[in-house]
Amino acid sequence: MNIREGILDSLVDGGESIVQITEYLEYLKIQSSRSVVVNEIKQLLRQKKIYIEYPSIAKGMVEIEVDKIEDYWFELTESGRLEWDRIRE
């Protein structure tokens, strides 16, 4: 499993912050730096595979403020869930 797949997998059961996502990647033994995880989250947002659920003022944002990333909770979109379903098969 790669970083992208690990992030999608971490969100399959509900919203998570970068803290929980990073801990889950560590649990899966996926080696990564924080900047790589942040960049992948940014890409998934732009591709509409995930969205920001919390705080509500950030819903719909596709660009995040990196210095505030720990404030955001991410969820899978339907497109993200479909990608994860293909990975799972």
Image (spheres, rainbow, N blue to C red):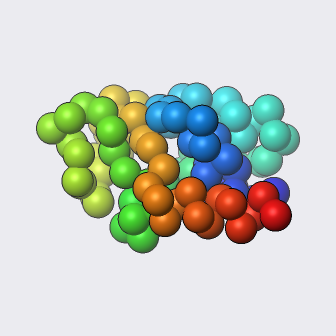
Q: Residue furthest left?
A: 57
| Closer to the camera in the image, 77 or 66 | 77
Position in image of residue 31 (x %, y %): 78, 48
| Closer to the camera in the image, 28 or 69 | 28
In the rendered view of the protein, which quadrant contains the N terminus?
bottom right
In the rendered view of the protein, which quadrant contains the C terminus?
bottom right
Position in image of residue 32 (x %, y %): 70, 49
Would residue 65 be found to the left or right of residue 24 on screen? Answer: left
Residue 10 quadrant: top right
**Vertical position of residue 52 compared to residue 84: above or below:** above
Would residue 11 be found to the left or right of residue 69 on screen? Answer: right
What residue is drawn where x is 71% and y is 67%? 86
| Closer to the camera in the image, 56 or 66 | 56
Would residue 55 be found to the left or right of residue 53 on screen? Answer: left
Position in image of residue 42 (x %, y %): 42, 59
Residue 34 shows in this picture: yes
Position in image of residue 40 (x %, y %): 53, 59
Residue 75 quadrant: top left
